[in-house]
Every structure is written in C-alpha cells, then in structure tokens.
Image: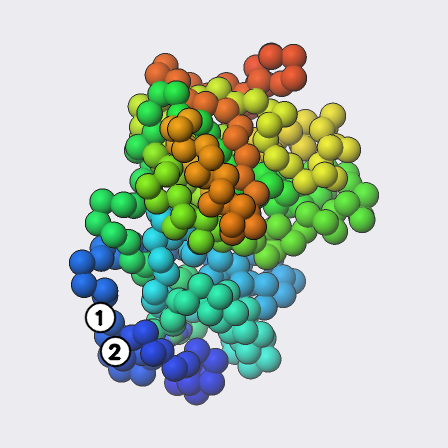
C-alpha cells in the first residue's frame, strides 16, 4: 500500500543519480571537486498551510522553499529526498501534490531520489535538497562589509499582504488581493539569480521570515548594521493603496514567505548585478547600505525612522 503509493506518485527516472527510489539508500556521484550544499524544510498542516490549500500548490511550495535556500547559497540543485507523514491516503490528492512538486523540481534539474512515507495524525511534508557549489564560492550570511549595498530581488511583502488579507488583519479589495495571493501560494525560488550572484554578492539570504529579520541575520553574522530607504523597497503596485495601514507596512518590513533574495554587494558590482539580473529577467532593487555600527534602521520619505515593532516571524514567540 505504502509501496504502491511511492511507486505511483514519487518514483521517476533519475538520470542524474546512480540509484534512485526503491532501494535502502539512493546513490549519487557528486561532481568531482564540488561541495554539497544541503538544506531541509518542513511544511506542517495548520502551521505552514491550511487543510483547504490545494495539493498542487503545496507540492510546488514544498519544493520552492527548499530550492530557495539553495538559491540563497548560490548552489545548483541536484537531488532531493521527500518525507511524508499523512493521516490517510487520497490518491487524487497525492497525484496533484506530486505534479506540483515535480514541476518545480524539474524546472531546476533537481531529482527526487528517495524519502520516507509514514502514517501520522498531522499532514506533514519535509524535503531535503542537495545542491552543488564550487568550494569557497557559497554566498554565506557572514560576508557583508560596511558600505556594501543592500539589494532585494522581485517584490517584497506580497506574500505577507496576501496572508494578512486571508487572516482578516488587512482589508483589501478582492481584485487587489487576487494579485498578491500567488506570491503566497506559488513562490518563485531565485535559483538562477543566486548562482549568478556568486562572485558578485558578499552575503545572501532568502526572505522567508521577513525582510528585516532575514537581513538582520546577515547583519549579525557579518558584524555590520544597515540603513534602508522604505521608498526604495520594491512592492506590488497594489500595495501602494494600503501604505497608510500599519498592517501593510508590517507585511512589507516583517512579513515572510516571499522567498526573494536579500543580498549585499560592494558598490563596484552594481553594473554587473544589474546586467546579470536583467539577463535572467529578474528585477533587483537597491534598498539601502550597510554601515560599521550595528543596528537596522528603515527611514520613510521624510528621513524618519519607522518603528520596527516586530521584525519577522518567530516560530517560538509566545
Ligand atoms: P526503508 O524501510 O529501507 O527505509 P522505505 O520502505 O521507507 O524503505 O522506502 C522504500 C523506498 O522508497 C526507498 O528507496 C525510499 O527512499 C523511497 N521512498 C519512501 N517514501 C518516499 C517518498 N515520499 N518520496 C520518494 N521516495 C520515497
Ligand atoms: Mg524508510
């Protein structure tokens, strides 16, 4: 039964592996001389997704949030293993989940080579992804230098605006909400951008817990501070209608789930970064700069510091 399920939904040809699903272990041959970048993320019903969320979107998100971590290191995705805990089996649901998962994995050349499947009370998915990177080239959180530019990819806050709308914390016109909901359900990991930033960026992170919280990790690890210009933070055009709402400002500065990259780079890399992003069709924006004194300040158009009550999502906050 469990084996049928694995065979039907999660067993695919894996030309990039020596041995894929079906034995006690998968076997892979990493490219000689490369380092492995390894990361894992859990998605738990009731915490990371809701029972009514569609399975194909969940499959997409399971892959996207993990590929986003590889992106933030500049690594090239190669292999993945999938852990599923589920209360009951529903074939059509799992087929749609697998479709969403494989579409995202296939788009980035990442092969599912194994996993584990078990019955449990709470529907849970975990994916571990393995990427490759040239030794010494990974974009860690610790490399920012004072005076570096702070950049972000894409648009910031869209996923959190959608979540605030869905949770009733922010009123939005339905046609506006419809424009930001895809950012929450179908995030785009910036895998190619991450790879292109190797050698250009000094530090990088993906925005999963909130812009200020995630940038804060770079700052702490690098021993620098930063000043950001709120007006320079790229937001969806519909967000401008809601900027008088504290919930909207909070979504942009402290909301998570965008899976965009936030990175730092020396000013002399500006042209190269813009060219790389343009060739990939990804928007990048310079939103501030780092400084040698610690702290993070976001200023409004009048140069006043915006109070940061909550900088991001803390899984263990009371
Ligand atoms: P074992 O008991 O040796 O751990 P399992 O019965 O758990 O083996 O799994 C059988 C095979 O199916 C293994 O190759 C395992 O990696 C793979 N597998 C199990 N669950 C999944 C899954 N959800 N996705 C992909 N592969 C899976
Ligand atoms: Mg097992």
- Going from N to C along the chain, the mark reached first, 2 or 1, is 2
Q: Is mark 2 within 8 Å of ligand 1?
A: no
Spatial CA span between label 2 and label 1: 7 Å
Going 59% across and 80% down the picture, which residue do you hit? 92
User: Does residue 217 appear in this view?
Assistant: no
261 to the left or right of 164 = left
Q: Quadrant of residue 197?
A: top left
Secondary structure under tag 2 reads loop
In the foreground, 187 or 139: 139
Query: Mark 2 = which residue?
Result: 18
Q: How is the image coloured?
A: rainbow
Horizontal and vertical percent for residue 275? 49, 42
- Around disc 1, counting alpha carbons within 10 Å, would you say few (fewer than 14), some (14 to 19), or many (20 or more)? few
Q: Residue at x 61, y 56 (%)?
A: 185
Residue in the image at 37% along x and 38% along y = 200
- Please say whether residue 295 is visible from this viewpoint: yes
Q: Position of residue 26 (x, y in %)?
A: 26, 75
What residue do we see at 25% from left, 57% from top?
36
Q: Residue furthest left?
A: 33
Residue 222 as seen in the image, left or right of residue 210? left
Q: Would you place residue 288 above or below residue 129 in this image?
A: above
x%, y% of residue 268?
Answer: 40, 28
10 Å neighbourhood of mark 2: few (<14), some, or many (≥20)?
A: few
> Where in the figure is residue 237, as x and y percent of width and height?
72, 39
Q: Is residue 109 above or below residue 203?
A: below
Q: Nearer the viewer, residue 177 or 76?
A: 76
User: In the rendering, which numbered label is found on residue 304?
Assistant: none
Determine which of the numbered discs, if any, sits on residue 29 in the image.
1
Tag 2–tag 1 contact (CB < 8 Å) = yes
């Amino acid at each position: 039964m469990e084996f049928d399920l694995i065979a039907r939904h999660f067993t695919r040809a894996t030309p990039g592996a020596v041995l894929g699903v079906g034995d006690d272990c998968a076997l892979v041959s990493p490219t000689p001389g490369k380092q492995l970048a390894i990361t894992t993320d859990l998605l738990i019903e009731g915490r990371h997704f809701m029972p009514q969320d569609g399975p194909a979107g969940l499959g997409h998100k399971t892959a996207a949030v993990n590929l986003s971590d590889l992106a933030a290191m500049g690594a090239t995705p190669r292999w993945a293993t999938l852990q599923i805990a589920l209360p009951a089996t529903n074939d059509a649901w799992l087929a749609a989940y697998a479709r969403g998962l494989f579409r995202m994995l296939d788009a980035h050349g990442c092969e599912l080579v194994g996993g584990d499947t078990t019955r449990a009370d709470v529907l849970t998915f975990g994916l571990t992804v393995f990427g490759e990177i040239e030794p010494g080239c990974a974009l860690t959180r610790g490399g920012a230098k004072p005076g570096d530019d702070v950049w972000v990819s894409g648009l910031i806050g869209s996923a959190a605006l959608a979540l605030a709308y869905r949770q009733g914390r922010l009123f939005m016109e339905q046609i506006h909400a419809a424009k930001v909901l895809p950012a929450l359900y179908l995030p785009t990991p910036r895998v190619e951008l991450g790879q292109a930033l190797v050698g250009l960026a000094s530090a990088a992170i993906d925005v999963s817990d909130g812009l200020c919280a995630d940038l804060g990790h770079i700052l702490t690890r690098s021993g620098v501070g930063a000043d950001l210009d709120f007006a320079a933070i790229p937001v969806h055009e519909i967000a401008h209608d809601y900027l008088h709402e504290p919930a909207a400002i909070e979504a942009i500065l402290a909301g998570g789930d965008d899976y965009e990259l936030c990175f730092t780079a020396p000013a002399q890399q500006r042209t190269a970064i813009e060219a790389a992003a343009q060739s990939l069709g990804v928007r990048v924006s310079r939103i501030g700069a780092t400084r040698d004194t610690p702290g993070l300040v976001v200023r409004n158009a009048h140069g006043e510091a915006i109070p940061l009550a909550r900088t991001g999502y803390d899984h263990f906050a009371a």
